Image (spheres, rainbow, N blue to C red):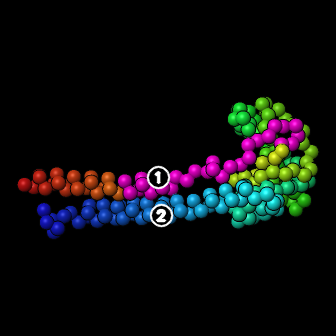
Amino acid sequence: MTLRQLPILPTLLVAVAVAVMVALGVWQLDRAGQKEALLAHYAQASRMSSDVDWPISVDQAEQRLYRHTRVVCARVEGIEARAGRSTSDAPGWVHVAQCRLPSGTIAPVVLGWSQNPDAISFGGGEVGGFIAPGPRLVASPAVAGLQDMSRPDPGDLPNNHMSYAMQWFFFALTALVIYALALQKRIKEQD
């Protein structure tokens, strides 16, 4: 089979698909580098000892994750229990208060951990802790008679962009191999 005998439309479709898959793989490689830099930033932030203000925008939240902060819970809008784990990895319940800050914004505050989901009493006040993704404040130490939660750890965030990149490259290679096998079969049928 010569180049002229290649089926035009299938060859074009496979070429476009392979090009898209390779581009997606390259994009994931770039994202892997960006994520590594972000995780390094978060690791450095988690080692800082000075307090920061509670974030009031998405950009601020991104820059202040894993830093220590203090908020004044002027009014508790509600408290809910969610499944969670203690510092010793025991299953139980974390209690999350929706706190209205003096500025009027709402901040989710993880007050602490308990073995049961029963309602707790928390009337507000100053709470210190670490800014976790969400953003939410994980109280440290726990308040309202609850047990401490584990400190948010940037090491818990996955960075699987490299494996995604390898998957895209594998898909592109697989498409080429399948197409080559299909062409080989077509050649044998024409002979």
Crowd band around label 2 with a 10 angstrom C-alpha radius: few (<14), some (14–19), many (20+): some
Which circle's residue, 2 or 1, is located before the other in the chain? Answer: 2
Vertical arrangement, residue 123 with respect to residue 16, above or below: above
Is 160 in the magenta?
yes
Q: Which of 9 and 104 is in front in this view?
A: 104
At 46% from the left and 52% from the top, the residue drawn is 163
* Outermost residue toward the top in this view: 116
The quarter of the image holding the C terminus is bottom left
SS of the residue under disc 2:
helix
The residue that label 2 is drawn on is 27
Percent position (x, y) of residue 184?
17, 54
| Res 2 → quadrant | bottom left
Q: Which of 161 and 180 is in front in this view?
A: 161
> The residue under label 1 is which amino acid type?
Ser
The residue that label 1 is drawn on is 163
At 44% from the left and 64% from the top, the residue drawn is 26
Residue 135 visible, this orientation: no
Crowd band around label 1 with a 10 angstrom C-alpha radius: few (<14), some (14–19), many (20+): some
Task: Please give the range of residues in magenta.
Answer: 142-171
Please indicate whether residue 191 sits to the left or right of residue 72 in the image: left
| Res 35 → quadrant | bottom right
Tag nearer the camera, 2 or 1: 1
Percent position (x, y) of residue 110?
79, 45
Vertical arrangement, residue 124 with respect to residue 114, above or below: below
Is 19 in the magenta?
no
At 35% from the left and 57% from the top, the residue drawn is 172
SS of the residue under disc 1:
helix
At 71% from the left and 32% from the top, the residue drawn is 90
Rounded to the nearest whole Å, what is the CA distance between mark 2 and mark 1? 12 Å
